[in-house]
Image (cartoon, helix red, strand yellow):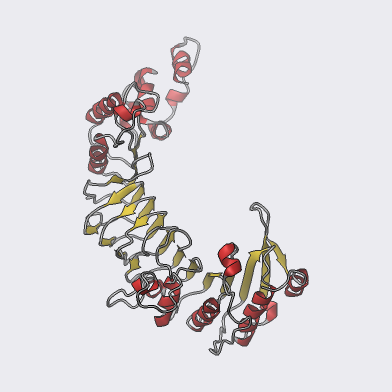
Amino acid sequence: MFDGMRKKAAGADCEDRISELPDALLHHVLSLLPVDEAVQTSVLARRWRQLWKGMPALRLVGPRTRFPSAEDFDRFVNRLIAARGDSPLASCEIVAYLTRDDYAGEPDEPEPNVQFQSWIQYALACRVRELKVVGDLVGSETELVVPLISQHLTSLDVHSVFLDKDFVDFSSCPVLEELKMLECGFWVQNVSFPSLKRMCLVECNFSEGYRVRISAPSVVSLRLDDCRGKTPLLESMPLLETASIDLSYGCKDQCRGCGGDESCEGCHGYPVGSYQSVLLNSLSNAVNLELKDQPKVYIYERDLESCPIFGRLKTLLLDMWCRTVDMHALVRILQHTPILEKLTLQLRSDENFLNAGRGERKHVRIAQSFVCAHLKEVNIECEEKLRVKDKVRQIVKILNRGGIRTEQISFKKIPRPEGYRFQVVSPRAFDDNWSGSGGD
């Protein structure tokens, strides 16, 4: 690409229109390239010699095939940093890579390059606003040892790193508002994000021996998805508006069928000191809420014993495994959501679903009453081959007793395999279609 541009720029009869573009636009284009390719544009023409130094973004994405060795890439980046100086950065992406022996195909004990941490410090010194850090690429995590101190950092996107201190405090980043962490390790006791507004933790690892306490009092949007280990304890989130919590995979807060035995290491690992709940109390200010889990996970069930009032909640999505405990939990939640407007219940299927509820009475009496005066819409979703006719009828009866008319309830069959559209049907059509599917 660059050879062609150079030939056009050098040709006597060719007009170099690209070089006539404003600096801001050219800087943006260069920022989309790996940093070494951006620097190569300095040979195109006189105007391009220093242009790369003004790029508002750097992508330090590793040597790959463009350098003979990792050390060569290190030297290149260090020279680039010396030449560029501390000009402000809008964004920076730093990807760890393997040392020379590993790069050459002999990975005995893979370790990221030693420059990884110093480049993070350089980005912070350049007053970077958006920082992306990707740690080890061979299935483990890289420790983040650089203290994150910045008066300018607003967004942090971190992959495959771990925190390993008793207490991690991000108060030294007073304008940090957005945090994304993927496959990261929280080997800490407490972590504090005073200014954070949006937090997304996906497939992260938490200790199995204790609960990590997360303080994020300014958060308005929260996603906790498929994290492993013990569910972290969330402290007060008074400004929360939207939350999505999925404890379906990897969660170690599971009852092992103890039947109330105090020696169970699963559900009797729940006590959290002076805190009344692990999640729900801190989620009680949400306007939009999604709660998902798997049958053996007990966090929601135990949290509901001290269920708070969800005084602002308008939209709620719940997993329903159609167990007795889920029916009671549904009623208890509806008793504590006075202005709820939309409810979605998802009936999920796997071996656990088919076995859930066996040995229980088919029709469980729910004595508690509730009234949902503001509830306008109820959606019940399940896969089209599930045999849940009786269970759906039971849910409908519970809702009817709370003043929700059958006409307000719609049903969606979620087809398998994925990729099909939802099929919306009326209650009567749903009942007719399921008439031959049998009972439980």
Q: Is residue 349 left or right of residue 237?
A: right
Residue 347 visible in the snapshot: no
Answer with the quarter of the image where residue 365 lies: bottom right
Residue lying at 40% horizontally and 68% vertically, measured from the top left:
240
Q: Is residue 409 left or right of residue 75?
A: right
Image coordinates of residue 258 in percent, x first then y, are 43, 74
- In this rendering, is residue 436 above or below 123? below
Image coordinates of residue 143 in percent, x first then y, are 27, 46
Image coordinates of residue 331 in percent, x first then y, are 53, 82
Image coordinates of residue 274 in percent, x first then y, are 27, 78
Seen from the viewer's position, the closer of residues 183 and 286 is 183
Q: Is residue 240 left or right of residue 384?
A: left
Q: How many labels sit on residues?
A: 0
Seen from the viewer's position, the closer of residues 350 and 216 is 350
Answer with the quarter of the image where residue 348 lies: bottom right
- In this rendering, is residue 76 above or below 366? above
Residue lying at 32% horizontally and 37% vertically, measured from the top left:
96
Seen from the viewer's position, the closer of residues 16 and 292 is 292
Picture quarter with the C terminus: bottom right
